[in-house]
Amino acid sequence: MSLSGHYFTLRQHFARLVEPGLPDNLTRWEQSGRDQHGSPMVLRGVVAHASERELLVVLHGLGGSIASRYMTRALHAALGRGVSCLLLNVRGAGDSSANVAHAGLIDDLELALAADSLARYERVYLLGYSMGGHLALRYASHQPDRRVRSVAALCSPLDLAAAMQAMDQGRLNPYRRYVLGGLAAQFARYAAGAQAPISPERARGIRRFFAWDSEVIAPVFGFADAWDYYERCSAANTLSALAVPALYVGAKSDPMIPYDSVSPALRRARGKLSVVWAESGGHLAFPAQFSLGGPDELSLEAQCLSWLMHPTKI
């Protein structure tokens, strides 16, 4: 991995701090259901209605929420094409209730798309950032809603064990600390209203993803251990069953989801995915003129939406 990956990732992170957030005129959205234990849960987000027929559903990364700045860019891309847009907080994120999130919770997408408030839409597109892209790809491999037409994943892990091992390398990893900090904050809200397997103090002290998955994800969701979670929930194991056209976009210098942790899974996908790699760039950070093959003056989100609406093999 080159230093350019760190440069792009950090530069874009700090640039986003001064980007405008979500506009104030969005409609609050929610859908109620039950989690895997039968306990009540509520998914929440915001929706902008621009079309009665087409809807873009956008999924944030691990430890993120609809407040993550990249979500705003996806919203503007959708509205620029006259497509309605739902920014969804998965469980545990933002103001969505119920336990904590993990990478395989396709139940959240099933619950969201079953909402009466979304029944009007005839065509649904899924766009996921990082872990949100993993969730979208896994969902699209398990009998997705018939209205889902296509899926796009940006800088997403595919093999959860490989992603964990990459992120857990090294004693000092600012990305690992940043994401685990966001997860610990979400966990504290969960632990305040439920019997959690560890204390919020212990959660804040976890320094490795393997420990997080072992001490939080496995006991909360009933996996035998972290390795059982990785095996049962990795999108890499189900990509050959993708039911709709799918696009994967990554950066070869991504310091968080390295090329080598993703490329073997893509080879096992048996041609089900269109794949585009940026030679430079970082995690969710691409050169200004990066193109998927269409007009490079468009934002990456706008290019992804164009592909989602009219998927072709890249």
Image (cartoon, rainbow, N blue to C red):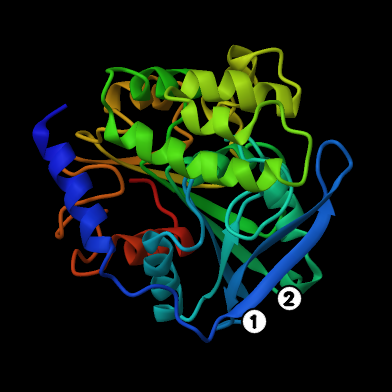
Q: Quadrant of residue 173?
A: top left
Residue at 41% over, 66% down: 74
Relative to 14, 36 lies left or right: right
**Sequence order check, earlier mark of 1 and 2:** 1
Measured as percent of width and height from the top left, residue 153 is found at 44, 46
Question: Residue furthest toward the left?
Answer: 3
Residue at 34% over, 21% down: 166
Tell me if label 1 and label 2 are in contact, CB under 8 Å: yes
Q: Does residue 279 appear anywhere in the picture?
A: no
SS assignment at label 2: loop
Question: Alpha-carbon neighbours of circle 2 within 10 Å: few (<14), some, or many (≥20)?
Answer: few
SS assignment at label 1: loop
Residue at 42% over, 59% down: 68
The answer to whether residue 300 is above or below residue 286 is: below
Measured as percent of width and height from the top left, residue 118 is found at 72, 70
Question: Alpha-carbon neighbours of circle 1 within 10 Å: few (<14), some, or many (≥20)?
Answer: some
Q: Which residue is mark 1?
A: 52
Marks 1 and 2 sit apart, C-alpha to C-alpha, by: 6 Å
Relative to 183, 197 lies left or right: right
Give the residue type that dot 1 points to. Answer: Glu
Measured as percent of width and height from the top left, residue 189 is found at 65, 48
Q: Nearer the viewer, residue 101 or 272?
A: 101
Q: Nearer the viewer, residue 180 or 300?
A: 180
Q: Quadrant of residue 85?
A: bottom right
Question: Residue furthest toward the right?
Answer: 38
Relative to 31, 250 lies left or right: left
What is the number of callouts on the image? 2
Give the residue type that dot 2 points to. Answer: Arg
Residue at 54% over, 25% down: 212
Q: Which residue is mark 2?
A: 120
Measured as percent of width and height from the top left, residue 140 is found at 61, 43
Look at the image and tell me in which quarter the N terminus lies: top left
